Amino acid sequence: MKEWLLGYLFNEYPPIWISSWGILCLLTGSVVILLVILRSRLIKTRKIQLQEKFREEYEALLTEFVFDEEEYEVGEEKYNALVFRLQRAAKNDIRREVLVATILFLHHDFKGAPEKRLVRLYQDVGLEKYAFRAIRYGSWYEKAFEFTELGQMQVNHGLPLVLNYIGHYSTVLREEAQFAAVRMGGVKNLEYLSELNRSVSDWQQTRIMQELDQFPLEDIPSFYYLLDAKNDSIIVFGLKLISKYRQLDNPDKMVGLLWHENLDVGVAALSALVAIDHFPVADDLPNLFYSHDEQFQPEVIRAIGLLGNDSHIPFLEELLQRNDYDLVMAATKALIRLGYTLPANTTLSSYNKEIYKHARYELIP
């Protein structure tokens, strides 16, 4: 073997043979790669075609079901036949994917009875079992989609599974699970927030607040319990909710948060006290002004203008003398709200007089 190899490598034509073998391998590899790409594209094209075909089929079928209540009355023969047909279709991955997407799409557009009929159909077909399987064994993006699906279809018995992810390290999974929990279990499920260690983003807070708008006011609980959370973002969210619903249970609890070490908490507490018109806090505001840095001070002055009285005018007049545009502007607006008029013999600098004049133009058309 050794002699043959040496003879082959050192014979008269080794470069030709080596080049030929190299070119042949290259061509063979290129053909294989091309075939793989073509096969992948054919499969993808076929899948898209099937999805479009099934989408048209299910849109027509489900639209007929939604609007023809007499023909598809729950429990009757035609309804049961539809359920059986969709159960068989759901065993095929592509059909099930299109069916669920169509139900969710129509559910989003319809309100009232049609919306409820779609939820009932989804549950009777048993589509949630596929969602549960995806949450347990699927990829992260499949889990996130299924949280949305279960929440929208109000699969309340799936709530324990969803709650396992509300503190997940993945932001996407965590936020989708939190939002689904509210949709599935109502406002009472917001209690989980007080136990969270991770921050709740402003975007997530906005989503949850918008979802709460779907509930009757009498179902909205007091959110003061969120002020005891160890997570500052949850405290801020609780203050926003208290402000939104003007809850007056225990305003003194919010007053204590004005001196919180986290500036965001202090600002949110002050905004909430202003929102519920808690006038007694006005007497604490001058001291609060001197206890915080310049970032918080304009907010304190604004609150004095909304909650204060004539006794605060000397404090605000002193601020007019400052060489700080933001403070002078805030103090001017607060004084105007309290009915103050700048005296003719004022000792303000010409610069501060211009600020005062500009503030008046902003507040008074």
Image (tube, rainbow, N blue to C red):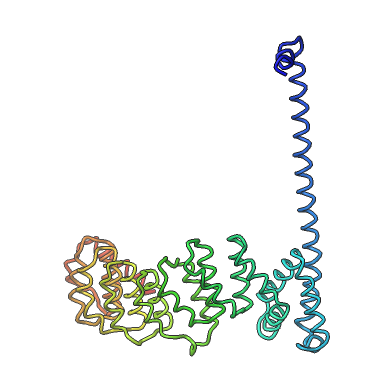
Extreme residue toward the top, this view: 12
Closer to us: 287 or 134: 134
On the picture, is 85 further left or further right than 321?
right
The image shows residue 171, relative to residue 260, as above or below, that is: above
Q: Residue at x 70, y 70 (%)?
A: 100
Rendering coords of residue 208 (x, y %): 50, 74
Q: Depth check: 349 or 2 in front?
A: 2
Q: Position of residue 196 (x, y in %)?
A: 42, 70
Position of residue 311 measured from the top left corner of the image (x, y, whole percent): 19, 81
Q: Work out which quarter of the rendered image holds the N terminus and state it.
A: top right
Describe residue 118's horizontal placement relative to residue 214 as left or right.
right
Which corner quadrant holds the C terminus? bottom left
Residue, x 62% and y 78% (percent of image)?
155
- Quarter where residue 11 is shown: top right
| Residue 153: % across, % down | 64, 77
Q: Could you say which quadrant of the image residue 87 lies in?
A: bottom right
Looking at the image, which residue is at 53% across and 64% down?
173
Which residue is more in the foreground, 88 or 284? 88
Left or right: 213 as drawn, with respect to 299 = right
23 over 144 or under it: above or below: above
Please give the count of numbered marks on the rendered protein.
0
Where is 93 relative to 239, above or below?
above
Q: Nearer the viewer, residue 349 or 119?
A: 119
Query: Who's the residue at 67% across and 73% down the image?
Result: 129
